[in-house]
């Protein structure tokens, strides 16, 4: 039979059905070696749930094509939510990296190694009398000094500024995510969709 329900109800029904299917699959695994267990019966139940799930997903997809705000569809806001959730995840990763000072710790180790190599070249320059060899050592020393300068640019002050910027960006992203969720919540509860429902699943789709 056909039934008209809100997208909110359909999304809940989809989540419920997916959970019921998962539970049935776990039952099948647990009772696989039970000689009294009728696997065909359970497979049939899973299959009927899967068929109903397909119809529900199709109806949700139709509902998500509805225009809601600024000439955009619900799909558009779903995709935007995914975009900002990924951005939030990236920013949290960066924030965590800065808070543990992993980069600065690595930086200090690199600086220490470069300084040791420069000192070693200084000693060789003092000892070697061959002008050509001295010139090679001096060239290598200058390259190391340039590398040291680049590494030294990243300081605690630099990472503090980055932390402040990332915290601000996270706040902005949280606001945007909240706004998009509000739009979706409103749209899902006000958008009605027709869906085919088998009698046995009428109670799932309210």
Image: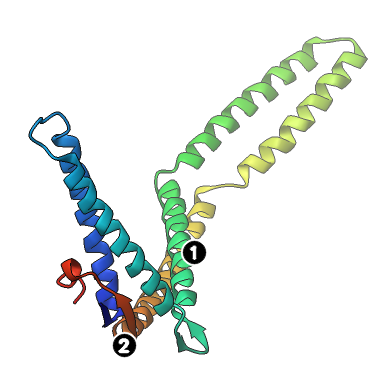
| Quadrant (top left, top right, bottom left, bottom right) of the C terminus | bottom left
Q: What separation in Å lies between label 1 and label 2 (alpha carbons)?
A: 38 Å
Counting residues from the start of the chain, the first of labels 1 and 2 encountered is 1
Residue 129 coordinates in the image, percent (x, y): 87, 9
Q: Position of residue 56 (x, y in %)?
A: 32, 69
Q: How many numbered circles does the render carry?
A: 2
106 or 68, which is in the foreground?
A: 68
**Under tag 1, what secondary structure?**
helix
Residue at (69, 17) in percent of width and height: 120
The residue under label 1 is: 165
Q: Circle 2 sits in a helix, a strand or a loop, which is it?
A: helix
Q: Residue at x 79, y 31 (%)?
A: 142
Left or right: 129 with respect to 93? right
Question: Would you name the residue on which mark 2 appears?
Answer: 190
Left or right placement of residue 151 versus residue 27 in this view: right
Q: Residue furthest right?
A: 132
196 over 30 or under it: above or below: below
């Amino acid at each position: 039979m056909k039934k008209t329900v809100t997208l909110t109800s359909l999304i809940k029904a989809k989540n419920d059905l997916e959970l019921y299917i998962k539970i049935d699959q776990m039952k099948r695994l647990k009772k696989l070696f039970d000689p009294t267990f009728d696997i065909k019966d359970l497979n049939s139940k899973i299959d009927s749930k899967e068929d109903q799930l397909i119809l529900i997903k199709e109806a949700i997809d139709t509902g998500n094509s509805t225009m809601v705000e600024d000439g955009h569809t619900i799909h558009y806001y779903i995709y935007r939510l995914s975009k900002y959730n990924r951005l939030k995840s990236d920013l949290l990763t960066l924030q965590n990296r800065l808070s543990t000072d992993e980069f600065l710790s690595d930086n200090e180790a690199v600086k220490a190694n470069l300084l040791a190599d420069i000192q070693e070249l200084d000693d060789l320059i003092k000892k070697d009398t061959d002008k050509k060899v001295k010139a090679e050592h001096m060239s290598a020393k200058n390259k190391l000094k340039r590398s040291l300068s680049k590494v030294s640019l990243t300081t605690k002050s630099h990472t503090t500024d980055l932390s402040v910027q990332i915290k601000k960006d996270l706040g902005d992203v949280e606001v945007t995510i909240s706004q998009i969720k509000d739009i979706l919540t409103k749209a899902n509860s006000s958008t009605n969709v027709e869906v085919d429902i088998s009698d046995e699943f009428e109670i799932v789709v309210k």
